[in-house]
Amino acid sequence: MTEAALGVGVVGCGAIGLRRATVAASHPASRVVAVADLEPARAREAAEAAGAQTLAGWREVVRHPEVDVVIVATTHDWLAPISIAALEAGKHVLCEKPMAAGSREAGELVAAVRRTGRFLKVGFNHREHPAIRQAHDLAVRGEVGDIYFIRCRYGHGGRPGYEREWRMDPERSGGGELLDQGIHAIDLFRWFLGDLSEATGITATWEWRAPVEDNVFALFRTPQGQVASLHASWTQWKNLFSFEVVGARGALLVEGLGKSYGTERLTMQRRIPSGPPEEERLEFPEPDRSWDREWEDFVAAIRGAGAPAVGAEDGLAALRLVEAVYESARSGATVRLETPVGVTER
């Protein structure tokens, strides 16, 4: 017998919430029941796009008897409280990254997942980009040998009025560019390398007049001595994504994420001791379906396939590393993390 479609509620209908609502509505195993947003116009837009009803607020979405899954895509300060309430109400949760504004709330969210037995997936959709996924598969198979280091550059240039947006308010965001784009790279570092045990950071605010960083430079090290470096920027005037994995036998370079970041590409370099490396390049010009693949993974988990990729523990670990970078930037010293949590795989 065919299982009934999962009922979905969406809290937060900005650009990300709207996209997640339309993805859930288009999946054959889910239907969007209700949406809510502080701005009624955004809620109406999402409701029309997903064929759902608008409700007065997030509590009504969480309590709705036909909602099985809640997508939480709010400002960072509300991600954890709403997700915890949804878990306590017996719902599964897809929580947008960074999962919380800080590690304390993230720890409470991890505890709620364990207490309720519900699934929570964190919206680190970059794992589902085809070039990144293929690079990970190649690295796991040992195609580049032992990994020495990973280097990531990621950034955009903001937009007019960016300094007045909620991301610039540390009470609502928890931080700046490191929590906006940089945390995606941190999740990828952990996916490729495992737990990171040391962090060193420098933050700067050069362009946007706000009490959060618009640039961050971070260096991480694993217990085995592998290194990952990150420069994330809100002053990258031409949007940029570059992710390079270098090992004993070769290297993998991912460039672009589609649209304004350029066509997604994967370059594979095979080391030749006597000369330049052999290169093979793949391009992925198709539209970005990372959001769809994320949702497919989550639906499969709920239907019995096991824990979803990128769980609450991964979100907590990433936030601990974010806070270690901030602490290092303040103190000028390397910060060592003592409690590795492992990486969720699927």
Image (tube, rainbow, N blue to C red):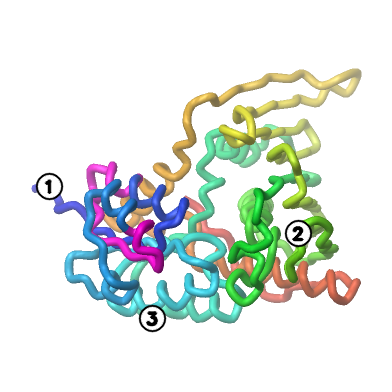
Magenta segment, which residues? Answer: 23-43
Residue 270 shown left or right of residue 69 in the figure: right
Sequence-earlier tag: 1 or 2: 1
Q: Quadrant of residue 82?
A: bottom left
Q: Is residue 19 above or below residue 134?
A: below
Q: Which of marks 3 and 2 is nearer the N terminus?
A: 3
- 274 within the magenta span: no
Is residue 34 magenta-colored? yes
Q: Mark 3 points at which residue?
A: 115
The residue depicted at 35 percent of the width and 45 percent of the height is: 23
Residue type at mark 3 is Arg
Residue located 15% across and 51% down the image: 3
Say whether disc 1 or disc 3 marks the residue closer to the N-terminus.
Answer: 1
Q: Which type of secondary structure does the marked residue at label 1 adopt?
A: loop
Apparent side of residue 146 relative to residue 344 in the rendered image (left or right) = right
Q: Mark 1 points at which residue?
A: 2
Residue 80: x percent and y percent?
48, 74
Q: Which residue matches tag 2?
A: 208
